[in-house]
Image (cartoon, rainbow, N blue to C red):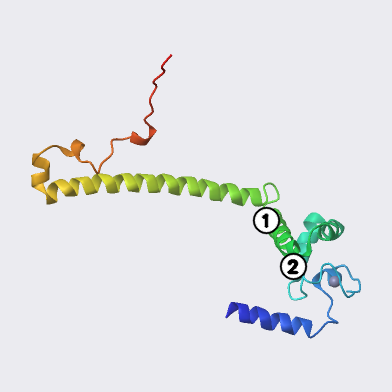
């Protein structure tokens, strides 16, 4: 559905080749055939170019686009647009601010997941003792082979033959 819409949009914009791209409209210049900006800055999205121009400058962007392979240009422009928008929202940290917020979130969720997994191991070992009282008659919970002692994975030998 989304791809179909994109296709229709693309067809619509190519049926009006005289419409200048957002970059040329912004810079008040004629959008010539083969304009380096036109595939990546459609006239329907003027903010994308305005942001990129404000942060990086149109001449730097055109220099960059001419230096990289055509198949990498769309990704490069989308990255520039993302970075420019982030820099305008957060002039000090830009997208680094968003990255560090997400990294802190990942760390917090990883700790939460570790704690939940530890709870699960503890609860399932308690459940085994309640459900199968005969299994606990042969030993205590510490001998349950399904439960590893804490820091089992971190245990290392300090054996030095010399
Ligand atoms: Zn153009």
Label disc, if present, on residue 86 of the rendered structure: 1
What residue is drawn where x is 83% and y is 80%?
19
Left or right of residue 76: residue 121: left
Please, which residue is most extreme toward the top here?
A: 162
What residue is drawn where x is 89% and y is 71%?
28
What residue is drawn where x is 29% and y is 46%?
119
Q: Which residue is mark 2?
A: 47
Q: How many marks?
A: 2
Toward which corner of the image does residue 159 lie, by quadrant?
A: top left
Q: Residue 133 location in percent, x, y?
A: 9, 46
Give the CA separation, mark 1 to mark 2.
13 Å
Left or right of residue 27: residue 41: left
Q: Earlier in the sequence, mark 1 or mark 2?
A: 2
Query: Ligand 1 is found in which quarter of the picture?
Result: bottom right
Q: Residue 156 location in percent, x, y?
A: 38, 28
* Quadrant into which the N terminus falls: bottom right
Toward which corner of the image does residue 42 lie, by quadrant?
A: bottom right
Q: Which structural element holds mark 1? A: helix
Q: Which structural element holds mark 2? A: helix
Left or right of residue 73: residue 66: right
């Amino acid at each position: 559905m989304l791809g179909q819409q994109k296709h229709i949009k693309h067809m619509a914009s190519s049926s009006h080749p005289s419409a200048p791209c957002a970059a040329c409209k912004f810079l008040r210049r004629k959008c010539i055939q083969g304009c380096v900006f036109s595939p990546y800055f459609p006239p329907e999205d003027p903010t994308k170019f305005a942001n990129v121009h404000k942060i990086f400058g149109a001449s730097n962007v055109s220099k960059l686009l001419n230096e990289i392979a055509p198949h990498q240009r769309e990704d490069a422009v989308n990255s520039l647009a993302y970075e420019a928008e982030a820099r305008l929202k957060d002039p000090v940290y830009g997208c680094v601010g968003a990255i560090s917020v997400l990294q802190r979130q990942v760390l917090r969720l990883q700790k939460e997941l570790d704690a939940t997994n530890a709870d699960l191991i503890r609860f399932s070992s308690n459940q085994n003792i309640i459900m199968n009282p005969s299994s606990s008659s042969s030993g205590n919970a510490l001998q349950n082979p399904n439960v590893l002692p804490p820091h089992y994975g971190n245990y290392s030998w300090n054996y030095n033959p010399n």
